[in-house]
Structures are given as C-alpha cells and as structure tokens.
Image: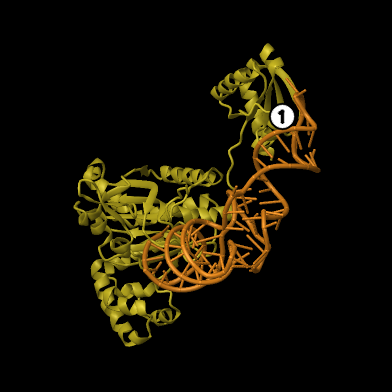
Amino acid sequence: MSAIEAIKGTRDILPDEIGYWQWLEQVARSVLGRAAYCEIRTPIFEQTDLFARGIGEATDVVGKEMYTFMDKGERSVTLRPEGTAGVVRAYIENGLHVKGSLQRLWYLGPMFRYENVQAGRQRQFHQLGCEVLGSADPRADVEVIAIAIDILTALGLTGLRLDLNSVGTPRDRQRYRAALVDYLTPYQEKLDPDSQVRLTRNPMRILDSKHPETQKIVQDAPKIWDHLDPESQQRFEQVQQQLTDLGIDFHLNPCLVRGLDYYTHTAFEIVAETGLGAQNAVGGGGRYDGLVAELGGSETSAVGWAMGLERLLLLLQQAAAAPVTQLDFYVVSRGTHAEPQSLRLAQSLRHAGFSVELDLSASAFGKQFKRADRSGAAACLILGDDEAAQSTVQLKWLGSGEQESMPQSQLIEQATSLKAKIQSLTQRE
RNA sequence: GCGAGCGUAGCCAAGUGGUUAAGGCAGCGGAUUGUGGUUCCGCCACUCGGGAGUUCGAAUCUCCUCGUUCGCCCCA
C-alpha cells in the first residue's frame, strides 16, 4: 500500500521549525498590540463572489488561481486567496464602523492560490496582514508602513528595501494610462510578447515587466506622478514627508504597480535585496479607498498590507538559529515502585511551573541518561526504587555533573530558588 | 499554463546494464542489569518516487505519470 502524501504546494511545519513561527507570531502580536490593533479571524472560505468583486475579475488571482468549488448546497465557494476581502466583508456585515469611526485590525492565517510552486511560493501559504478602515488621513498610511518596518526590525531582518509609489485615483490612472499607451505604441514591436498583450488590456502592468528590452523602453516612459491631480499629489508628498520624519528610508519606484484592482493612492512593497529567489517581495500593500463601497458598504477609506510568512521564514532561517525552548528537568526512573512515582513527580513539578520531560522507556539508566543529555534539560531527576521507598530524589545538574539527594517535596518548596538557578545556568550558555 | 534540472532509508549520499544496493549522520539494542556527552560491537532499503516497456538480466536504457527544485507568468 503506498503512503499518502501531502498535496502539491502544501507542507508540514515540523517541530524543528515551529520555533521560528511562534517567535514571528509573538513579535507581530506585540508590535500590533502596542499600536492598538485588534486581531480578527475570518473564515477560510467565502462566497466566490466576494473575491471576484473585491479583487477584480480581470486579475490573475481571480481568473486562474482560486480554489473554487461547489458545496453540497450548490453554492460556489472559494478558499481565500488573500485576507483583505474577508476582513472588509466582516467589517461591513458586523457593522464594525458603528463601534467607532475607525477600526484597526490585523489577521494571520493560511491563504490559498493555485499557482506553480517555486522558491517562496506555495499553494497554501500564510499571510500576516493589517488594515485601517475608516481613515483617509495620510498618517494612517504611514502608521501601517511603520508597523510593518517595526515587525521586520524586531525580527532582526536587514537588507530590506521599502518601495513606494502612488497609483492615484481611478481618474488619475485613466489619464495616465492614455499617456502611457501614447508613449509605448511606437515601440510596440520591440516589447516582449506578454507586454504587447498588456498594451491594450492593462498597460500599467508593462511597467513592472522583468524583460530587459521592455525595461529599457519603460525607463523613459511618462511617470504617473506627472498625471496625479493636485490633491493626489499632495497626499503623496505628505506620506513621503511623514516617512522621512520617522526616519524610515524608502525608495520611490514609479514602476511599482500592484496586482489587485482595489488599490488607490499609496502603494508600497517591501522587497528583500538578497536571500529570496525571484519571489523577493516579503510584503506589500497600500490604500484601497474604493473597496468597502465596492463590497456593499458605505464609502470608507482604508489602507493596509500583507506579508508572506514563508518568505519571511526563509530570511529568518538565514539570519538566526531557531529559538529553542529550554527544558528544566528530565526525569529518569527505573523499578516497579519508582516508575509510577515518576509520573506523580513530573506532574507536581509541572504544576509548580517547571518544564519537565519524563522518560518512558524503562530502559537501563545509562540509556536514559543519554537521552537526558540530548534533551538539553538543565537537570536530571533520578528516581529508582531506593529513592521511591524514601520519597527522595537525586538531582543531577547536567552541566556540572553535581548531584545531590533530597526529599521530593523539597523541589516544590524551593521552586523559586531552583528556577533562579536554572535561569542563571541557561543564560550563561 | 510554459521551460529546464533532479527523485536511491528519517537526513546526506556512492553506484551509469551483470548474481547478496557502498559509506556517513540520526535511530534502536548491547559492551555498561543505578549514572550522560567518548569509544567499540550489532541491527536498521527483498529494493532505488510510481507504472509500463526494451533486455537472458534494469537503480542504471526508453516512454508515461507523480513529486521536487529553479525560472517564465503572477504575487506576499
């Protein structure tokens, strides 16, 4: 019988890797919490329509990458390919705008896109995202960017670059598109085949083409900055000014175009300059003033971002060793009286706040010591029938080899000083 | 959806048509029946991702398929 394997594009996150995930989640939670953002958890699947309307029918994500199926009630449902649409749906449906003029939210969880797998790209992947709903203030744009930077900095990541652009209002874009097409049409023959198709369908996407020939042509293309109306222009300048005030470096990139239809004004991306393959964007986002209304809510300004956690993990693994959780005691026991007692001892130590691993092998003490050593515990507790008869235990410090005998109850009574000792031993390493 | 490379144990691998598939790490057992990190010994792939074919004979050659890696595309 052949074994069943995980579905293509999915993978298991195993114990030796989980430390990174927990650390990352803890850092994110803490940074977002300090900025008064609240977590929101929305369903992993939604009505297909939510994404079709929210993200845009014409986008690749909706057009060819969604996990869409009919449920038993003949409803078309889709595994969420991104987080914002669901958050906005929840915001509207639960009337969150009533509870305050402004909502600051964050989420973390799996997303699904049917794409071909590649470095830093899977079919089930995880995103951390944050959204500010109900503010048009440019400070909101800057706040979310600052939070993203803070999270990445707290994780100790370097070599990242913040790319910034403004995609203006839909009207700005319409004007710009016309200017861009006017400029590119004479070069039509020289563009790569994909870009030739885009020229009529979505000319702005030509800007971020990776084709060298196309890039050369794009270099001298008109920039959207020259086609923003004065209001959009002013917003863009305010965002730049405030980022500078906060000491956040950014790189103006007129070719930064986001793939989802709902973005307006501020658009940004955080890219890794090294360490990732072709999929080098670790995070991206921007303002999406039209989305809430598009999904049936009232006109609401909003801004947010999402980060790809697998990509962050790739960088973390290159930058730092996995955080390990320190084990206090490893309990070794052998004998008909000692073995049942070892379980009670482990349990009472856990209740007293220690982390305790119990050896269940009942093999020779020598073998159990080897495992104790490998466990990385600060100390080993030895319980044989002799100790069991007297309710004592041998406490052996695995670093120094020092060993002492004491009543079992003493471990609990002196818990505070023992913890202090373990703390000092583990910090020295 | 397209292109290229790669699949031998939990991991890293040698092997490129000739009877029993090196080695290392990890794991398990023993030397050591109550004291660890060393050492030594033993065990650990009826089978080379899966299927079909060529051949007297296939891990090795051919085809299909699945997975994986790196790209294109797209995106976080």
In the rendered image, the vertical position of residue B57 relative to residue A98, given as above or below: below
Look at the image and tell me whether residue A157 can be seen.
no
The image position of residue A159, as x and y in percent, is 54, 61
Q: Quadrant of the C terminus of chain A?
A: top right
Residue at x 39% of width, y 53% of height: A144
Look at the image and tell me whether residue A212 can be seen.
yes
Q: Chain of mark 1?
A: A
Q: Locate residue B47 relative to residue A169 in the image: left or right.
A: right
Q: In the orientation shown, which residue stands out farthest toward the top? A: A390
The image position of residue A84, as x and y in percent, is 32, 53
Q: Colour of chain B?
A: orange
Q: Locate residue A310 relative to residue A417 in the image: left or right.
A: left
Q: Colour of chain A?
A: yellow
Q: How is the image coloured?
A: by chain
Residue that carries the numbered disc 1 in the rendered image:
A397
The residue lying toward the viewer, choosing from B47 and A391, is B47
The residue lying toward the viewer, choosing from A188 and A38, is A188
Determine crowd level at label 1: few under 14, some 14-19, many 20+ residues with C-alpha closer than 10 A.
some
Q: Locate residue A349 relative to residue A76 in the image: left or right.
A: right
The residue lying toward the viewer, choosing from A327 and A113, is A113
State which quadrant residue B36 falls in: top right
User: Three-letter amino acid code at disc 1?
Assistant: Trp
In the rendered image, the vertical position of residue A343 relative to residue A22, given as above or below: above
Q: What element does badge 1 sit on? A: strand
Residue at x 32% of width, y 87% of height: A186
Q: How many marks?
A: 1
In the rendered image, the vertical position of residue A124 relative to residue A59, given as above or below: above
The image position of residue A13, as x and y in percent, is 49, 47
The image position of residue A82, as x and y in percent, is 34, 54
